[in-house]
Amino acid sequence: MQEIFGRIKKRAAELFADGTVTRMVGWQKGESDYDKTPAVFGPDMKGFVYDGFCGANLSKYLINLSKVEGRTLVLLKPCDSYSFNQLLTEHRIDRDKVYAIGIDCNGKLDINKIRALGVKGIRSVAEEGDEVVLDTVYGSKRVKRSEVLLDRCYCCKGKDHVAGDEFILAEKRVDTTTTDRFELVKKLEAMTPDERYEFWRGELSRCIRCNACRNVCPACSCVKCVFDNPALGTDSKANSDTFEENMFHIIRAFHVAGRCTDCGECSRVCPQHIPLHLLNRKFIRDIDELYGEYQAGAEVGQRGPLTDFAKNDAEPGATPDKGGKK
Amino acid sequence: MQRIGVFVCWCGTNIAATVDVKAVAEAARKEPGVVFATDYQYMCSEAGQKLIRDAIAEHKLTGVVICSCSPRMHEATFRKTVEAAGLNPYMLEVANIREQCSWIHKDRTEATEKAVVLARTAIAKVSLNVPLTAGESPVTKRALVIGGGIAGIQSALDIADAGYEVDIVEKQPTIGGKMTQIDKTFPTLDCAACILTPKMVDAAQHEKITIYSYSEVTEVTGFVGAFKARIKRKARFVDETKCTGCGECTSKCPSKKNKNEFNLGLDNRTAIYIPFAQAVPKVAVIDAESCIKKKTGKCGLCQKICGAGAIDYEQKDEYIEREYGAIVVATGYNPIDLAKYDEYAYSQSPDVVTSLELERLMNAAGPTKGTLLRPSDGTHPHTIVFIQCVGSRCDDARGKPYCSKICCMYTAKHAMLIREKYPDTEVHVFYIDVRTPGKNFDEFYRRAVEQYGVDYIKGMVGKVVPHDGKLLVQGSDLIANEQVRIEADMVVLAAAIEPDKSARSIATMLTASIDTNDFFTEAHPKLRPVESPTAGVFLSGVCQGPKDIPETVAQASACAAKVIGLLAKDKLKGNPCVAHVNEEMCNGCSTCEKVCPYGAITYQDKEFRVPGPKRTEIRRVASVNEAVCQGCGACTVACMSGAMDIKGFANKQIFAEVDAICR
Amino acid sequence: MQIKIDENGNFKPTIVAFCCNWCSYAGADLAGTSRLSYPANVKIVRVPCSCRVNPLFILRAFQRGADGVILCGCHPGDCHYTTGNYYTRRRMTLLFNMLDYLGIERDRTRVEWVSAAEGAKMARVMNEFVARICELGENKRLEDLRCKKSLEE
């Protein structure tokens, strides 16, 4: 990872120097050392970092950056490249104004899992083989990478990029996939409706409507969100018993259905740790099963499953029972 | 705030017997925005309508709710009523308290309660109505006919006879299409050329018709009433205005070994050629791929010979652009390629022919001058086997799932003609079913069997094996339940027909839909069979589905009638309840465009004011062509940001209705 | 909020039905013309096409206290606008599955294809649907997915 970081910096400097790009979107230290946050850099790249905490998907920033003068260098992890393609499909990014480097990813780290192992006061992170070396104020700690990854990285879409002008990759790629991404969806499907309702009520009632999920989501990139739109009658402000308030997550999931690349950012940023990706994955699983395997962002120009049909599609309500007892 | 008037109709006793109309009016009066509410025996009567008009004037109403029968019944009536009183006709909503209330509920309390809810739902909606005006667009009084076969010719002639300009665009060097290749027609046995060529001449001589032969439509933009088409006139290397069609060049051309398309490759033609004697226009064309001058630069014989000086080796493709009010698609069909049907030995023996090839072999203008001879050795065939449904009604990917419709009849025709001309010839027909629905069709088929002694065998052929100059045909007779072996001299395959390959690209150009078999889809299979769902695009002939000549001609004329009906209008009045986009909220993501069945949505880059130092930014936003949009609303749901909405069925209005019902 | 118990103590559900103008609304009219009765709880909202029905409308109805929402359109293949109901079919299949996934009773939502000639089907479907909603009782779940009410109680 450290070696990759060096190569990215070197290559970015070249691209700045030869005038290919005028800015770069990357990551910098946020409020804490383990909280790396997206940032836009000039040629000096001051504060730019790339390490195991750089989980944020940068593709969404290109919507605005492709409206300003000059080309933007963007760093895309394999899973981010799907979002990038999806935004290209939706004409939200001007491809000519972006220079995309596909960069290596060994899976990104989950600070909560690290904390759970009792590691505190992190100052920096490095990776050695299968281990993550954390430099903390209490000295150096080593943990197994496979124990501290973000949930999404255990069911990674793969370490191959689907977009990019060039790639900076390690010689030895790390496969972090260990589980079926639909495992939890299947588990929920197998519950009784009552159990499912209790589960979701437990999760969704914790929502504080901070909008972090919406703001981070590359698919939730409307010029104006329906929840902020007075013309539609769906907007409202800080009133707990409104339409918007109650249905927010269902509507959000439906709006990204067929467009969600399953990047998992919504769950990563949720301060209440609501597993929002399980809503999106339910749609993905149903789409795959009913209309054929579909991965949003796999190619530019795809026709999404909700803007397509087959004459013999399944009827609503006629979907096979998933084992959930009535 | 709107000033709403509510009018509750008794409909005699139809409503009043089950619904307490006075109570409904009373309840409506308490709704916000309602300034007047009343009831009356027959709202749709002249007296009732006057009551409405008077109330609009007296109470300065801005919105009207009629609680009455279904809007499908009298919405149009009441729109006119409010319009007569100076209101916009779309400031009206109808609450259906008859069909959907008084007629289905027996309990008076229950029915009245429901009527009150329906009334307040309509009030909630009308209070969000806005005046709507139907857009108008001018009509260019010229029609484009794509395809110059019998379908295209007939449509063009009918439209031109009504006094409108028509352009026929035909990709071949001559108009006439498939029918020119057919020998005789069923069930009358008219000579096809005798009935077709006069029509071709009529089309050529008609002052309102322009024929662009050897031309293709490459681009269509615009919409009903105002299409713009780009037509490519392929270089024929012969000046159409100078060529007299004398044919001198064709007799001298040294490049003689080129496959003659008109005779389906059964004989050869020269590099400069006129497709056939009655071609329209009767103008030579040079096939650049076989012309010695075009290939090597040497020769130039035709140019030397041509007295009219019509030969121009340097001619280039030309493009013309024209505007049209309506477009007729008449792209026709082709028999499928039989290369995949190896079991019938089509590629192995020249004596296995398609039915269309047989037409040429029997035609007086064909390669054998009308004498039926085997292509392999030029001898008379004595045993001929016809195989039906080759690729039609076929389950596998080689063929087509549909019935090609014409094969049963033309095969009966072929069999009959052969038996008549050559009584010593045995004719066997293998069939799955014989389908003869049509005037005089079954009589015709029975004549083939009963009078002409054609041997019909119910069953399919498994294999045709060329052997020693003969064709061994192995099939099964399902009725006798036995295997049949016939030693034939010729085998004729009734190849399935499929839409011309150009159908798909033309459909894309026109945003007209085609089905999985590439046949054009009609706007309604029963009620609008000659219109495409795309306004201003009409369907003529086999491009819409398999059909024979009389059906094609009937459809072509029906299609022309529809075109004339459109071109007769000076202006088109649209439906005002169409989609519109709030550009401030549009993402420009192209999702709505994908679900629009009419191609009514396009995208433009527009400048928008934004906060901050830049002040403006360019964004890609959707725009709806209101003349093309039919107002289905598919786009409004596909749109994530809610930028798309439908006038008259706006999101806010439907929310208001839902809220009013659930209140 | 409506009072959903009648004087005899029976549950009176609120049902919102979205009907497309060309087939199902005409089918409902035909049910009326044929005097085929169905419960008065059903209130029909006319839309140009079933594809006009935004999932938002359905969720809004539930949130405002509807106990069942039914959507009727032309039979697939017969859409007045050619393809509208095909999109509806996909959207609603996914939406209904999602509601089911959240533990909302599956039978509270329904899609039926009713042609203009199927007045009898319209009446039968509505009767069945209302009967089923009566069995399910009041819609409390979707109205209160986020437990705001139960927390207040």
Image (cartoon, rainbow, N blue to C red):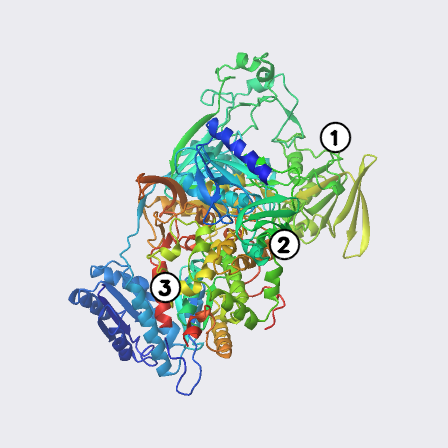
Residue B261 left/right relative to B340: left
At mark 3, the secondary structure is: helix
B598 and A232: which is toward the camera: A232
Disc 3 vs disc 1: Cβ atoms closer than 8 Å?
no
- Between tags 2 and 3, which lies in front? 2
The kind of residue on which mark 2 rests is: Glu
Q: CA distance from mark 3 to mark 1?
A: 79 Å
Q: Earlier in the sequence, mark 3 or mark 1?
A: 1
> In x, y percent, where is residue B95?
33, 69
Q: CA distance from mark 1 to mark 2?
A: 84 Å
Residue pointed to by mark 2: A147
B556 is higher (above) or lower (below) than C29: above
Chain at tag 3 = B
Residue appearing at x 44%, y 55% in the figure: A212
Chain at tag 1 = B
Mark 1 and mark 2 on one chain: no
C141 and B354: which is toward the camera: C141
At mark 2, the secondary structure is: helix
Residue B473 left/right relative to B180: right
A289 is higher (above) or lower (below) than B564: below
Q: CA distance from mark 2 to mark 3?
A: 49 Å
Q: Quadrant of residue B604?
A: top left
Q: Residue B11: which disc?
A: none
The kind of residue on which mark 3 rests is: Phe
Q: Residue B655: which disc?
A: 3
